[in-house]
Image (cartoon, grey):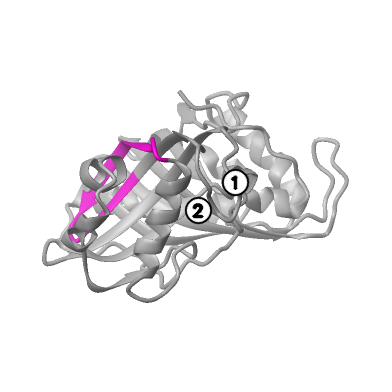
Amino acid sequence: MVEELHNGHRLERLDAFYGEGHQEHDPRVLPGPGGLRDFWRDLLHGFPDLRVTVDVLLADGDRVMAFMTWRGRQSGPFAGRPASGRELELRSGELFRLDGGRIAEHWAVVDYSVLRTFGAVHLQGAGPVRAGLDGRHGAAERENTALVLGAYEEVLTGHRLDRAEAYYERDYVHHNAQMPAVPNGVEAFKVYFAGNFAAFPDLTATVDHVVADGDRVMVFATWRGHFTGVSRGRAPTGRRLLMHTCDQFRLVEGKVAEHWEVVDYSGLQDAGIPVRPPVLG
């Protein structure tokens, strides 16, 4: 699909990849049989040289989760705006459910802090969630998934930073394109999230989808809270945070050794926190 549709721009092949009546949970795509085709037509008119690379791919039964990087120059009209000549660099998290060899359902985490600069209207909608593992998994995959879900519940929602070492290796590696200044290691993790908890005292993280394969676990998560506290010199706005992320974890001997993420940083913008431009290679 990526080779023919994303990079080959062969819209006539849409029906070969998407099943009849497939459910599209990406709010950028209007409902109905023509919604997906209209979405792709608008995107390719705006970025006729669009190229997409798959950075990470994890298959789990009938579901596939991926990180993708989108690049191109806006040399045509897009989202109701004329060509700007600007370069697009965008990362997304994608989740596909397949049935009969075609896509039956699709969810996405897309960074609207980037898309907004091209005129795309910010929409959020997660669709139905499947927060647990489906199908057959080995004991290690189930244990890894339980550990990741436990970290979301106890550390990230329960704000128990004193329990971080139970889930993360002391020198675990953190990959974040938007915030490259955040260093690796569990101590840096605790300092970073202490600032987040100070800014958002009611911060919660809910896992909406999870897939696992071997030593990898990937999740879609929704973060909620209100910017009512002072952190890193920023005055509170009282605004609500609603932010979606897609995260991949590599586990070693029962702890997170490495972490990658795709974040829709527009949620932070809406709450009143400025966002750095992404750093993409």
**Mark on residue 82?**
1
Q: Residue at x 48, y 66 (%)?
A: 126
* SS for callout 1: loop
How far from the left and from the top, in percent, is residue 268?
68, 49
How far from the left and from the top, in percent, is residue 182?
61, 27
* SS for callout 2: helix
Q: Residue at x 74, y 54 (%)?
A: 271
Q: Which quadrant of the figure has residue 133? A: bottom left
- Tell me which amino acid carries mark 1: Pro
Q: Mark 2: few, some, or many residues within 10 Å (few <14, many ≥20)? A: some
Does residue 60 sit above or below 231 in this rendering? below
Q: Mark 1: few, some, or many residues within 10 Å (few <14, many ≥20)? A: some
Quarter of the image for the C terminus: give it: top left
Q: Nearer the viewer, residue 243 or 115?
A: 115
Q: Nearer the viewer, residue 44 or 16?
A: 44
Q: Residue at x 22, y 41 (%)?
A: 3
The reply to whether the magenta stretch includes residue 108 is no
- Tell me which amino acid carries mark 2: Tyr
Kindly check if marks 2 and 1 are in contact, taking CB atoms under 8 A apart as contact: no
Q: Earlier in the sequence, mark 2 or mark 1?
A: 1
How far from the left and from the top, in percent, is residue 254?
33, 40
Q: Could you give the CA–CA distance between mark 2 and mark 1, rounded to whole angstroms?
A: 42 Å
How far from the left and from the top, in percent, is residue 215?
26, 39
**Mark on residue 65?**
none
Whether residue 55 can be seen here: yes
Name the residue carrying label 2: 152
From the image, give the main secondary structure of the stretch colored magenta.
strand
The reply to whether the magenta stretch includes residue 59 is yes
Q: How many marks?
A: 2
Q: Which residues are magenta?
A: 48-66
In the image, 31: left or right of 57? right
Whether residue 170 can be seen here: no
